[in-house]
Image (tube, rainbow, N blue to C red):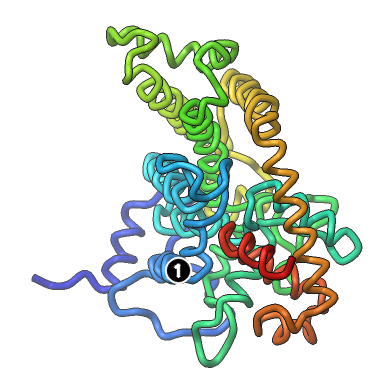
Amino acid sequence: MTPRTQKILCDLEDRALAPYAVHAGALEGRHYPETPHPYRTEFQRDRDRILHSQAFRRLEYKTQVFLSTTGDHLRNRLTHTIEVAGIARTIARSLGLNEDLTEAIALAHDLGHTPFGHAGERTLHSLMAGYGGFDHNLQAIRVVDLLETKYPAYDGLNLTWEVRSGLVKHRSQLHPVMLDGRALDPAPILEAQVADLADDLTYYGHDVDDGLDAGILTEDMMNEVAIWRMASEETKSLGLKRGDDKFVTYTVRALINRMVGDAIETSARLIESSGVASPADAPAKGLTLIAWSQEFQVLTSELRTFLYENLYFSQELKKLNQLSQERMSFLFDTFVAHPELAGSQIRRRMDVDGIHRAVTDYIAGMTDVFAICEYHRLK
C-alpha cells in the first residue's frame, strides 16, 4: 500500500471540493514559512496545533452558560467547541467546502473566551474601554499569534492566513478590519461562515438542553417558542409523550437537525444563485451565503430572544454573573496595580502591549477555577 502523502491528499481535495472552496494546495501561506508536512495538509496541521495548544485544553474549565463544574452533564466551553466543530464539518461536507479548514476555524473560535462566559467578556470589555476594549474573537487571534509559545523561533502557532482571518467574524465595508496590515474582505471565506453559523446553531440547541437539564427552563416555557413546538411535533409522531424520559432529549435532537438541514439547503441555493466560482468571490463581494431561510431566520431569532430573556439573564444566573463580574474587576485592578503578583506572562508582554492589555491577556486566559482561586488568594 502506498501511503497518502501530502501531495496525494491535496490532489484528492482538488477533485472532491467545489470550485468555491479553499483548497489546501493553493493557500496563502503562513507568516513564517515552513516545510510542508509529508502526510498532512496545511489545514490538518493547523487543526492539530489548535488541539495541542494550552488555550484549547483550558476550555474544559471555562463557562459556556453554567459555571464550570456546576453539573456533570452541563456543557463547558470545550464540549461546546467540539460540538460546533462536528456540526460545521457536516455542513461543510454537504456543500463541497474544505472540512479541515472549517474544523480548524471552529476549534479555534472560542480560544479567546474569558472565564465566566459572556459575563466575563462584558466585564473585560468595560474595564478596557479606554484601552481598545475586548472582543473574544479578536482575542483568539492574539492567542494563536502571540500568547501560545511552543516554537523556538517565534511566538504563536504560526497558523495559515485562512484560519487566522477566518477567526475575525465581524467585518465592515465602511471600516475594514486590518490583519497583518492588510484590510480583510467585507465577508469571511465560506468555511468561516459555516463555522460561524454552526456556533450559533449549536448554542441555540444545546443551551436549551442545558437549561432544561438545570431546571431553569421547562417544557411549558419552551412551548412558547415556535421552533420548539415544530420539533416536539416530530417527537410526538414517534409515539413519545411529554413526561417521557426521552421526549426532551429527542426534541432537542430534532430541533438541531431541523436547523442544520435548513442551513444546508438554503446555503446550497444561495451559493448556486450567487454564481461564485472561486474561494475569493464571496469574501470580496461581501456575500453571506451560509445562512438559514427567511422562515428559519425568524424562528431562530425568536429562540435566541427567548434564551436571552429566560436563561442567560435569568434570575437564577443573575447573582452568579454579578459575582463573576466582581471577581474579574478585582483581579484586573489588582494586577494592574501590582503586576508582580501575576505570572511571568504579564511581565513579558507589558513592555510591548502596555500593562492593561497584558493583564487582560492574563485574565482572559484563566479558567473559572483558576480565576476563583486567584481571587481568594489575593482578596
- Residue 284 in picture, x, y percent from top left: 67, 53
Say which of 39 and 207 sits in front.
207
Q: In the depicted view, which residue is nearer to us: 234 or 56?
A: 56
Residue at image mark 1: 46
Mark 1: which secondary structure? helix
Going by the image, does 325 lie left or right of 306? Answer: right
Q: Residues within 10 Å of mark 1 (few under 14, many from 20)?
A: many
* Residue sitting nearer the eye, 110 or 296: 110
Q: Specify whether residue 25 is in view.
A: no
Residue 170 to residue 177: above or below: above
Q: Is residue 322 left or right of residue 93?
A: right
If the image is split into quadrants, where does the N terminus sit?
A: bottom left
Residue found at x 61% / y 76%: 147
> Exactly how many numbered labels are in the figure?
1
Q: Position of residue 167 (x, y in %)?
A: 61, 58
Inspect the image, locate mark 1, and give the three-letter code of the amino acid beneath it.
Asp
The quarter holding residue 125 reads: bottom right
Can you give x and y, in whole percent of width and height, for residue 151 in the image? 50, 86
Considering every residue shown, the one lying at the far left of the view is 1
Position of 219 compared to 166: left or right? Answer: left
Is residue 236 visible from the viewing direction of this image?
A: yes
Seen at 42% across and 54% down, the residue is: 98
Q: In this view of the protein, which residue sits in the foreground, 180 or 289?
A: 180
Q: Is residue 309 above or below residue 181?
A: above
Residue 123 vs 34, above or below: the answer is above
Outermost residue on the bottom side: it is 153
* Quarter of the C terminus within the rendering: bottom right
At a point 75% along the width and 75% down the height, the residue shown is 358
Q: Residue at x 68, y 47 (%)?
A: 118
Residue 101 in the image, given as x and y percentages of width and height: 45, 58
